[in-house]
Amino acid sequence: MLELLLPPPVDPLWDLTEAYGADARPERLNLVLGVYRDHTGGTPVMTAVREAEIRLAQRSASKEYRGLSGNTAFNRAMLSMVLGSAPGGAAERAVAVQTVAGSGALRLLADLVCRTRPGTTVWISDPAYVNHRPILEAAGLNVRTYGWLDAEGGFDTEGMLEDLAQARRDDVVLLQGCCHNPTGVDPSARVWEALAEMAVRAGWVPFVDLAYHGLGDGLEADLAATRMLAERVPEMLIAVSCSKNFGLYSDRTGCAVVLGASRGALRHVETALQNAARTLYSMPPEHGAAVVAAVLEDDGLRAAWRGELEAMRGRIEANRSGLAGELSALGWDRQARVLARQKGMFSMLPLSPRQMLRLRSGFAIYGTTAGRINIAGLPAERIACLAQGISAVLAEDAGRPDSPVVQPVPAHRG
Ligand SMILES: Cc1ncc(COP(=O)(O)O)c(C=O)c1O
């Protein structure tokens, strides 16, 4: 049987991570995967999370199966974090089911769409999170794209709205709620309002992917667009990840949220999501969800977590403005301005795929070929070195847009 298996495509990010592992240059810098790193270069367990784990370890007496929707306290806490808990608010016409992290939520919601209306078209940004298209297509959905970046690397308002004007009733539009991966470029509040209006008028369903809330402008600000949409549209899907903002990457913690026009409209939703999960992985893992519930239900732990999240956000912001400052000092003002406007864990460098390869071969700096770097993984003492690498690559090509691939120079030290 196995001789029939064709060589499958290799995941580009993990492939790059392997190439990084095999790179012997001591100055190598890995900015590929979206993982927060502190000033020591590590990804520590957040103190509020650790404290919740200790409390849970002391009181949990069993690892018996949980219900099909996962940890219900976690689901309640997620609903109120994402949608608020005001009486009569959107959370009252929403249902939440715990999932295997944000990826599991994306897949479960995609399955729900497919079960409801097979062959539905889902619109994703171009460029998009690398796993959006594969997840949606694996669920049997039809994928189309809308524009995201303009020629200067800023947000392409006209391009996006023009493309989405073609979205039809019952199409689904996947939108990243904040800190767009891979570009770090987000729509303005005005564009979000225009999207809400379009969704209501045209009858398409927003599907919001929330993976970086708290790491852009702050937790409330990062959730504002999602909450505004939820108040305006009758139906909406939300995939929530706790991987980054709780640092629970390997505990695979997340939640699928579905909003209906009324509570009655939701009557089959939870069972449909449970059935979808049953055929994929049966039930989600308990640990991360129990930890998040314990943090959010305790005033002290919640405040500590918010403080740590703010500190992470501050470090990311300092990295980004540090890099923009260094680039500007090296004479790349326009590029620095584009970078400074970006938000969240990622930055899109103003470099072509060829220049990104050059950064890798000449300077041992690893970002994705499309230009994305994990700005949250950048050690402060390497900011100047990254800026010098980018500057050197830009200078090699300045005034030579069609220049051939340059030969690698000796590895940069520092
Ligand atoms: C935009 C976006 N959505 C969803 C995810 C899924 O995250 P996870 O499955 O680790 O929670 C990621 C992870 O990088 C992401 O960038």
Image: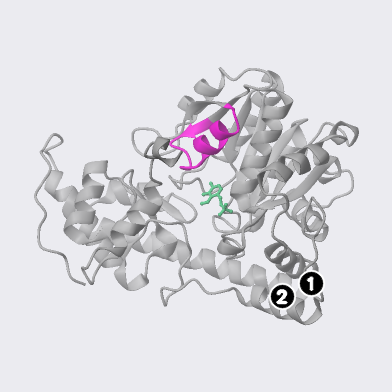
C-alpha separation, residue under disc 2 versus residue under disc 1: 9 Å
Q: Give the image location of residue 66, x and y in percent.
A: 81, 59
Cβ atoms under marks 2 and 1 closer than 8 Å: yes
Foreground of the two, 383 or 290 = 290
Residue furthest front as drawn: 1
In the rendered view, tell whether residue 314 sits above or below residue 108.
Answer: below
Asked which secondary structure carries label 1, the reply is loop
**Would you identify the image quadrant in which residue 292 lies?**
bottom right
Q: Give the image location of residue 192, x and y in percent.
A: 61, 36
Q: Which residue is mark 1?
A: 298
Query: Quick check: can you spot residue 355?
Result: yes
Residue 360 is left or right of residue 292, and the answer is left
Q: Which residue is mark 2?
A: 52
Q: How is this picture coloured? A: one colour
**Would you identify the image quadrant in which residue 376 lies?**
bottom left
Residue type at numbered disc 1:
Asp
Which residues lie in the magenta part? 124-141
